[in-house]
Image (cartoon, grey):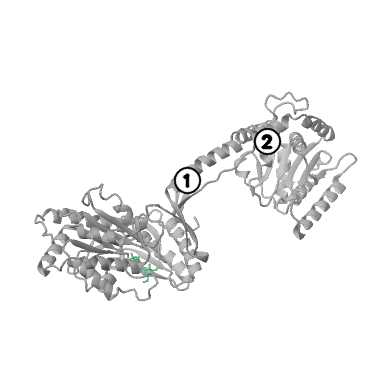
Amino acid sequence: MLGIEYQSKRGYIELDYFGRTVGIKIMPVGVHMGQLELGLRLPDREWRLSELQRQFQGKTVLLGVDDMDIFKGINLKLLAFENMLRTHPKWQGRAVLVQIANPARGRGKDLEAIQAEIEESCQRINGDFGQSGYSPVVFIGRDVSSVEKIAYYTIAECVVVTAVRDGMNLTPYEYVVCRQGAPGSQSVSEVSGPKKSMLVVSEFIGCSPSLSGAIRVNPWNIEATAEAMNEAISMPEQEKQLRHEKHYRYVRSHDVAYWSKSFIIDLERVCKDHFKRTCWGIGLGFGFRVVALDPHFTKLNMDSIINAYELSESRAILLDYDGTLVPQTSLNKEPSPQVLSIINTLCSDSRNIVFLVSGRDKDTLGKWFSSCPRLGIAAEHGYFLRWSREEEWQTCTQALDFGWMQMAKPVMNLYTEATDGSYIEAKESALVWHHQDADLGFGSSQAKEMLDHLESVLANEPVSVKSGQFIVEVKPQGISKGIVAERILASVKERGKQADFLLCIGDDRSDEDMFENIADIIGRNLVAPRTALFACTVGQKPSKAKFYLDDTFEVVTMLSALADATGPELETDSADESVAYISSLDIGDEQSESSDKPVEGS
Ligand SMILES: O=P(O)(O)OC[C@H]1O[C@H](O[C@H]2O[C@H](CO)[C@@H](O)[C@H](O)[C@H]2O)[C@H](O)[C@@H](O)[C@@H]1O
């Protein structure tokens, strides 16, 4: 839906737009039954009805009620009526088209041209087919009172709507109610016998799908509309009656009161969480957005995190890379010497487990962080994992089938060819389409289109298709930063040292998986009961994280403060031992069962 992630609920669509839930549903509005039935009981309507019955005695009336504007297709209706009289001469002298046209509300050349065409058509049809006492077209171009309109609806055998563009258009509904008459009415001029009504409606009007008994037409097709008019008025009486009953049941039960009640129920459901959020205007110019944030979403306080860090005995620090340790806009993507030094200081404390949790490939991360021997790395969103530089890379799941790559690649190729500056990155477990160097607007609209395309092509494959910072990525299901974060914490727990300090920081969509999975981690016993939990996103935006920092500069400043609060470096041997022990626990169960030696704390 417009490239925004959405969920299809039963019968409607729900999407998350900058923290606000937007519900999308087709909700056709109805008529005000009470008001119409009141009109049907007015004495004025009585005499107007008898007058019209006299005027059109022996005639079959087709009725049009439209505003005079360029979209209502009034002239198309006249042309179709003319065609019907010509191709079905039995209606000459018998069928009358009464066209009520509410005076135009606007002005302009187009409108004048349409009015001239309508006038010409009326004159021609009446000239060609009129006889004494019979004008095939009765054109009423003045304001018509509700009572008079009700009277016309009551005598009409069929209502014809040929708008080429319109909103809901309630004319057919009003007609059906008027043909039914007021319940319990003793009106003398009421149409006697079983109630009937017929509808010829344009497929381009909002009420068309709800009127299953109407004859639907494309109003531009004059011949087909003429045939539909003939079919409508020639139909056996019983069929007209059945169609009318069906329509009346629907129109009566789906009136405006029903619509407003269901609208309010839906509105309340969609907005139920809005009251729990605070709205902020963020950004400038075209980048301005109203963003709804959880009121508990606060800036990460430096003193609090340092304090918690100092008080803790076992710390897990999970760091995203792009957009967290290096700015997304930076041309040089490699980590700065400052970042490498901070990471090494954090890793030097045996109370700390520090992990890079990134979507990047293992070779790039391995090379960039080769000077950080004790850093753990989860590459490709956790598909690959290693606990230290000296460890082997391990894959986190059983062998996967990558046959889907043969399906995804050709789709990505299509968009790459059509989008200058874009390219495909083939990782071992995933395919990524990058558009950072493409035109900003075109690149992102192509990305939205491709996301939909890939989702439908890969609907039956075991993959997830996600967008990120200037990327669209297809990766195996069951591989996510959230899952690997849990695995890391479970391994730490297995050595009998549950983390009591957890910092999890990232900026992107994939990092939200991490925040989501750690939200209830205390309840699931993966960390100590009183763990100081710091889930932090980069940038003030809707997030599952409770904290935010503004940019990578603030992230590095915060990590540097933690590094300053870090205790003295461990003896190399003991640190290596600790890392080696944990790594033996990390993946397979057989390995963890054979480990029984507790790890020395600081
Ligand atoms: O999980 P992260 O550490 O945030 O990594 C996510 C993606 O990083 C890389 O893409 C990013 O850098 C590209 C330039 O080097 C840039 O074009 C793109 O917009 C960034 O998202 C990496 O190439 C992807 O595979 C990772 O998924």
Q: Is residue 367 above or below residue 383?
A: below
Q: Residues within 10 Å of mark 1 (few under 14, many from 20)?
A: some
429 left or right, relative to 209: left
Q: Amino acid at mark 2?
A: Val
Q: Residues within 10 Å of mark 2 (few under 14, many from 20)?
A: many
- Residue 86: give x, y in percent of width and height: 80, 46
> Which residue is situated farthest in the left direction here?
597
Q: Quadrant of the C terminus?
A: bottom left
Q: Amino acid at mark 1?
A: Val
- Residue 507: give x, y in percent of width and height: 36, 62
Q: Quadrant of ligand 1?
A: bottom left
> Which residue is situated farthest in the right direction here?
132
Q: Which label belongs to residue 79?
A: none
54 left or right, relative to 475: right
Q: Could you say which is closer to the camera, residue 574 or residue 378?
A: 574
Q: Quadrant of residue 322?
A: bottom left
Q: Nearer the viewer, mark 2 or mark 1?
A: 1
Q: Which label belongs to residue 176?
A: 2
Q: Could you say which is closer to the camera, residue 343 or residue 306?
A: 306
Q: Is residue 255 above or below residue 223?
A: above
Q: Which residue is mark 1?
A: 270
Q: Is residue 362 above or below residue 184?
A: below
- Residue 246: give x, y in percent of width and height: 62, 34
State yes or no: Cβ of the residue under disc 2 lies below 8 Å from any atom of ligand 1: no
